[in-house]
Amino acid sequence: MSTASKDTPLHIGVLAIQGDYAAHAKALRETGAEPVLVRKPEELSSIEGLVIPGGESTTFLKFLTRNGFLDALQSFVRNKPTFGTCAGCILLAKEVRNPSQESLAVLDATVERNAYGRQVDSTIQLGESKIPGGPLEMVYIRAPRIVKTGPEVEVLAERDGFPVLVRQQNIVAATFHPELSSDRRVHQLFLDLVREQRKQDL
Ligand code: GLN
């Protein structure tokens, strides 16, 4: 955002058409950022980073493909920091399986939807990650599995040998839901990327 100065709070959009966007907005507020609920393509112009929350990726797609929103999102995520959790991670991935579906295709990864079963497949685990400060609580809800990543993708945490938290330049994606835990380190990591981008843009 061209009007941002070094000290103005980070304006972070949260795609608010479906899913657990309210939990992300709360998490962002707790980390000192200013959440902006995004429901229309034109609202992307006022934000410096975007969170694509968990929910149901097919429902997101139904809405997004209707009014040109998907194209607007695609150009946003190619240029600005974006953080996708669960369904958000599915929407960011280059390839989606089980079944195959359209995506924003910016994260060099192959993602399998609902990879841990269909109904009773939600679990909370503590996992090691590259984020300092000890194990992270990871809340999985009908989670996808990242089965393949490209060379530019840094794996920040794994579950059973598969990546669950990754970063590729200024894209962060998690197959779990950091917004549903009280630990804010993953959101902080994302906000650090947004701050970096702001420095470059000023
Ligand atoms: N199962 C959902 C999907 O495939 C993702 C679940 C979630 O976001 N918690 O889109």
Image (cartoon, grey):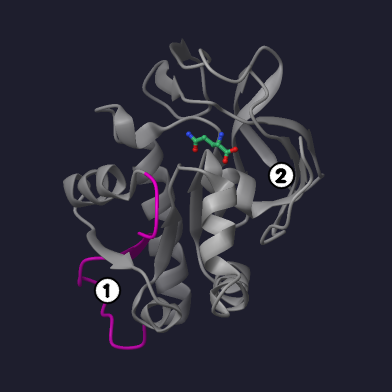
For label 1, count other residues whose C-alpha is less than 10 Å away and answer few (under 14), some (14-19) or many (20+): few
Point 51% across, 64% down: residue = 63
**Residue 122: x %, y % from top left:** 47, 17
Instruction: Say which mark, if any, is on residue 141.
Output: none
User: Is residue 183 positioned above or below 69 on the image?
Assistant: above
**Residue 33: x %, y % from top left:** 23, 58
Residue 170 showing in the rendered view? no
Compare residues 163 and 95 and report the one nearer the observer. Answer: 95
Q: What residue type is disc 1 on?
A: Lys
What residue is shown with label 1?
A: 6
- State how far apart marks 1 and 2 are (Cα): 29 Å
Task: Report helix, strand or loop for mark 1.
Answer: loop
Q: What residue type is disc 2 on?
A: Val
**Residue 128: x %, y % from top left:** 51, 16
What residue is shown with label 2?
A: 153
**Residue 81: x %, y % from top left:** 50, 62
Point 41% across, 20% down: residue = 136
Compare residues 114 and 53 and report the one nearer the observer. Answer: 114
Point 44% across, 63% down: residue = 196
Is ligand 1 closer than 8 angstroms to the Cβ of mark 2?
Answer: no
Report the number of discs.
Answer: 2
Point 63% across, 31% down: residue = 144
Q: Quadrant of residue 43?
A: bottom left
Query: Is residue 4 magenta-colored?
Result: yes
Q: Which residues are magenta?
A: 1-19
